[in-house]
Image (cartoon, rainbow, N blue to C red):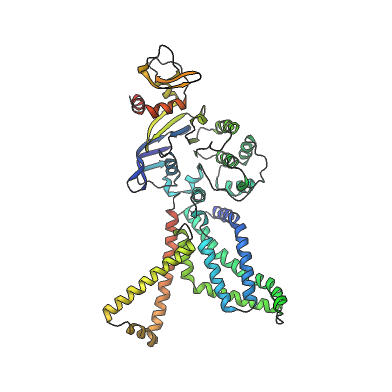
Amino acid sequence: MIEIKELKFAYKPKKFIIDNMNLNIEKGKIHGLLGKNGTGKTTLLKLIGGLLFPSSGSLDVMGFKPEKRQVNFLSNLYFLAEEFSSYDMSIKSFVNTHSVFYNKFSKEQFYSFLEAFEITDIKQNLKKLSFGTRKKVHIAFALATNANLIVMDEPTNGLDIPSKTQFRKIVLSAMREDLTIIISTHQVRDLHNLIDNILIMDKGNIILNQTNEAIISKLYFGIASNEDDNKDILYSDKTIKGVEIVRENTLNEDTELDIELLFNAICTNKEKIVKLFNK
Amino acid sequence: MEFNFLRFWNLLKRDFLLGYKKDIIVFAIFAFVNGIFFAQKFSYLGNMFIAIEMYVLLGFRIFMEYHKKLSRSNILLLPVSNLERYLSVFMRAFIYYPIMIIITIPIGAIIMKPILYLLTSDQTSSITDILFFAKDSIVRGLNTFSTYYVFIFALFFGSIFYKKLAGLKFPLLMNVIMTFSAIVLKWLFIAFFGEWGLFIIGISVDSTDFIINDAFIHTTLIVVSLILLFLAYLRLTEEQA
């Protein structure tokens, strides 16, 4: 779906935000792109969407070079930016004027997603809606395009707690075999039970690209017990429930992936964890 | 280069819907101004106002979506080709806006004539007069466009070249380039021929030379205009957000 080879990108000469990145993103999955602020997540997504042009290296998205902005590429991609300019038109006008550019757009789906987000008045002007409501309209539109690649940059920013739950449900209901979704966020809890594959970025490069299954086969997430040797613990965090830990899953124990713990573990013990996956 | 007529038509409709509210305000102001000047036979001032109106529209009302980062993403990600994006703005600048300016002349004149009659007691006012002046104004309007075509194409390019206040920055840049070129030209002429005066006399006295120079100037300006249009297209293809 997406093949990136030795990709470099800099806003200022020689100050690379993306530095020699190699990455393969498989189709038919929901990928969570995680990383601290300023690690280059948005820049990577913009490069994938053709909004920025690479300084060097190659980028192949669905067989297209994004910077060429070919119509077939753009009609199969929907890029939901973190912030967007609001159109001075009603939701109805927006969908009527913009859906025509997407061959597979389903108005039926769009209105059902809106309904799930509890947006019923389609005569409302987008400009007069709150940021969160506007975001919901764009999420509904993105999924209704039936594009093969949907890129979402911080989609849950501005959504209230019930809407975040609704967002997860809607995304899962819209999932198809030929749909690939990349969701970038620093609010890792929002991706709980949603993503199939985790991409973690650090200093302009991908340091982890693993499926959930691969992660839990290598790492154990849970509450520390007396048997846990301090030496094996890669990350620990005191909580009300006890001491939550991440350690190597040497005994193939059953465990549930905790994205937040994983992310914190990588932030504090990057080299050890990366080495573990490269074994 | 990809082009699909239906997709292009949809893009034109979208762009029109996005801009029509502000366009209405702008054209209402133009109708008022044009009405005052064209209804009173102030032909010279009227022509000047048409030029100013084109300047306002091309300097500040085209490539609007490309001027801000957020709206730039919207237009660049829309599934249309670069050629269609370009032609949509081209149509707006060189067909829609001139037609709208021309339409505001008779409408403005018809509305303003009775108002001016009440204010100034102008006895010559009649619908025939107004229609005659309007027709005359349209011809003069078209003449104005054809006279200032290089400036219009330059503004078109300037509007995608500069992201903020293109209408102010680009004319300023052109002014600097023209002044600098004139100084360099004068300096070169003096360096080669020793005297600046010969150059002036050479053009003004010899009528044959003058005709050749005039044709040469127009050919150059047409070539420059086409280059500016092409550069605007290239600039659009290189837009990033």
Residue at the location (37% across, 14% down)?
A229
Q: Is residue B227 above or below residue B132?
A: above
Q: Is residue A80 above or below residue A277?
A: below
Quadrant into which the C terminus of chain A falls: top left
Horizontal and vertical percent position of residue B74: 52, 49
- Give the farthest residue toward the bottom: B205
In terms of depth relative to the viewer, which is nearer, B237 or B83? B237
Horizontal and vertical percent position of residue A36: 43, 35
Q: Is residue B62 above or below residue A107?
A: below
Q: Is residue B6 above or below residue A43?
A: below
Quadrant into which the N terminus of chain A falls: top left
Could one spot residue B107 in this view of the protein? yes
- State left or right for residue B32 relative to residue A156: right
- State left or right for residue B98 relative to residue A72: right
Answer with the quarter of the image where residue A264 lies. top left
Horizontal and vertical percent position of residue A251: 39, 14
Residue at the location (48% across, 52% down)?
B81
Could one spot residue B3 in this view of the protein? no
Residue at the location (33% across, 48% down)?
A13
In terms of depth relative to the viewer, which is nearer, A165 or A78? A165
Horizontal and vertical percent position of residue A109: 61, 38
- State left or right for residue A218 relative to residue B4: left
- Give the farthest residue toward the top: A227
Residue at the location (52% across, 56% down)?
B64
